[in-house]
Amino acid sequence: MPNTFDSKETFVEKLKETTSDMYGRDFEETNTIQRYRALGSLILEEAGVNWRITKNAVKKQQAKQLYYFSMEFLMGRLMTSNLMNLGVYDVVKDGLEDLGMDINELEELESDAGLGNGGLGRLAACFMDSLASLNYAGNGNCIRYRYGLFKQEIVNNEQVELPDCWLKYGNIWEVWKPHHNARVKFGGYVDGYMNENGKFVVHHHPDFVVRAVAYDEPIIGYHTPTTNTLRLWDAEVDEESVPSGQLNKYLQDVSALTTNVYPDDSTQEGKELRLKQEYFFVCAGIDAIITEHLRRYPSLDNFADKVAIQLNDTHPVLVIPELMRVLMDEYDYNWDDAWQIVTNTVAYTNHTVMAEALEKWPVETVKKLLPRLYMIIEEIDRRWKFDVDHRGLCAIYPNVAIIREGNVHMANLAIVGSHSVNGVAALHSKILVDDVFKDFARIYPDHFNNKTNGITHRRWLMYSNPQLTALLDDTIGTDYKTDPRQLEKLMDYVDDPVVQQRFLDVKKERKKILAKYIKDTLDIDVNIDSIFDCQAKRLHAYKRQLLNIMHVMYLYMRMKEDRNFRIYPRTFIFSAKAAPSYYEAKEIIKLINIVAQRVNNDLETKDFLRVVFIPNYSVSIAEILMNAADVSEQISTAGKEASGTGNMKYMMNGALTLGTLDGANVEIVGQVGEENAKIFGLHVEDINHLKHENAYNSREFYNQHPEVRKVVDSLHNGYWAQNPDEFRMIYNDLIMNNDEYFVLADFNAYMKAQQEVEAMYRDQSHWAKMMLINIAKSGYFSSDRTIQEYNDDIWHLTKLKY
Ligand code: 26Y
């Protein structure tokens, strides 16, 4: 029998039949949602074949597997990526056309899986794609949140949060696995006794027990059979554990565990629910790994040879005490042997140096919710203290303590319990070693390493930018698809005027697509011949969207004052969600929207200046925004952005980086050369110096710089809003609280850099050359390279063979 995707004819037949069978009506009578779901089931069926092949290969080759534990997976949509990775996109597209349907229509029906806040979650998704595409057995482990991060609308210039109902039409990729389940126990108390062998036998009497149930999604590699698994855990009732007379409360508590993504990537709040979520998916994930291991091998002695666990930041750090618990309490290991296994298995990635985002939990909370794990954490800490003392370093112990001043410091636990600690860009990793974790680095210099982030060039170039892909295929062939470093071949063409023009045309095509989206959703006309200047990322003070909008305010005010001052037409595009309780960030969103309204409606300036705030930033919006950009704004305070990954997506699609020497920007400039990016602003050393010497006074700075003063004053003198208190928080942060993120300090340098960008853009041929160089050098930032490095240095998996 021919396969579904062998030809468009077989596909059409199969789709009609499946749709009819699923919905019990003639195909012609079915609606698009039904057809979409039927298509999903066909793809899943196809993936299922490879899923089985992969699982058998893992078994037969006794392959070591990676488990990527992450609280967040920002997968976005999977239809296009799955069809293309399977190599059947054109068959489906043509078949649907024969049925009078447009594939885009079905692609658009899919909701983004927005199970995350931002960079860290999207990184996890890119890693999944690279692992499978490189033939490594790599599994994701997370929570099946019923609602993604909130949906953002802008009402009266302000952010409003609405639920993100991503499961509205179901999730066509998931397979419910009720037989994969685990009991997760919380609260209560622990007792125990010494058995005849002198071993302490532990009994946990929990007061809340839920059942974790697995939903698996196939992760389909690019043109290879390898199909890995992303496992999302749902919480269900445990029928035997309903406290008597408290059914409703119990049901609510179970449900709350998986209701939504904790919508915060900045502030540390003692939210018990988040800690429960963390333990929930850790406990279930470990249980499943152990069960699978024991199905394959006689004992857990070789666990660390067959399993690698990567912690995506500290959110899943409970893996360390949980694995200790299981090994000791359930499989009778002694402490030292268990500790060997745990530390050889686990590795930790840090994604932030912001003090407020380094997780710490009150001892009381941990004790109350996870009494047995707390005992183990205490013992880890006790032995760690002993170890540190033994090294003659008792003076530094307070800096490396796991439990200190009534809190459990999760990063410290992660470092002590891992064999590898990495940052996500060279500069960030250096800051970890020199500053944030310097005392640990003294003790364990070999544990620290860098793994500069990457992005999957399949989604972010090949699938989201087919125009550029076609042109690359034409110009340098297709090797770069499996070996992204081959993009470098484009260097032979950077001076070729014909090639330059064709690339400029592609960029214009992408700008048109974004302009149409802006028109359709916001009813704003933008000029595609203007410079598209984009900043899209979570809203956070350190990312300094404020610096960007203050510069826009400056340009507008200056054009209003001086008829002779006119800029090259520019469209400033913002997109950003703010954590719901992060008021300063929300005020900045309001400021951007108020400025946009004024500027876009001013007949005198609107041919030169447009400001657009695209609501509800998400993976799908990034897919049309990044590749339309001319200028990529990466303007964080130096030392604060661990890496950034948006910067890489822009670069790969030929935008110029306008940035500070922060995160991976440093490496982007390293690749393209200083003349092919625009770097400005204070360096980390400058900022450290200013801080240590107490040498920065933002008020003085404001007094001395008339341009800065004018913009700051406009925040409260009625220029933008009648209410003088509208932007009070922003004003206070800048002037009263000494401008923690050095916005004013970098303002003049930023303004000058922007002028230089404009001058460069005016020379289109030169601009095209820079754009080509950026694309040519972007291969380094493919997550295939990143994953290869993780594997070479940390995981040591062997590629699956078929
Ligand atoms: C503690 C908790 C509330 C929390 C939740 C989410 C803390 C942090 C986060 C998320 C952090 C995050 O997304 N970090 C970003 O990781 C990217 C991938 O490594 C980096 O590129 C980016 O610079 C960093 O901000």
Image (cartoon, rainbow, N blue to C red):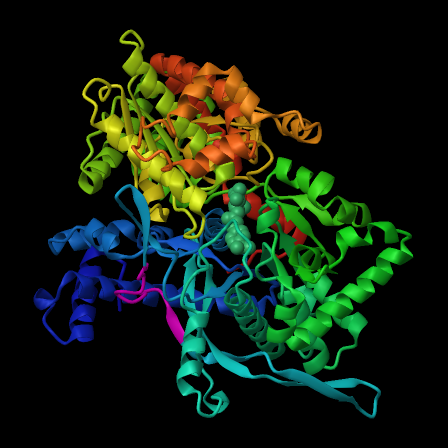
Rendered position, 237 above or below 519? below
One can see residue 624 in this view: yes
Main SS of residues in magenta: loop
One can see residue 489 in this view: no
Quarter of the rendering occupied by the N terminus: bottom left
Residue 317 in picture, x, y percent from top left: 62, 62
Q: Is 704 colored magenta in this rendering? A: no
Q: Which residue shows up at 52% across the image and 82% down it? A: 209
Rendered position, 770 above or below 466? above
Q: In the picture provided, is 753 more to the left or to the right than 85?
A: right
Q: Which residue shows up at 29% across the image and 6% down it? A: 564
Q: How many marks?
A: 0
Q: Is 170 colored magenta in this rendering? A: yes
Segment tinted magenta in the rendering: 163-176
Locate residue 176: give its quadrant.
Answer: bottom left
Residue 650 in picture, x, y percent from top left: 41, 34
Q: In the picture provided, is 93 more to the left or to the right than 281?
A: left
Viewer-side residue, 243 vs 721: 721
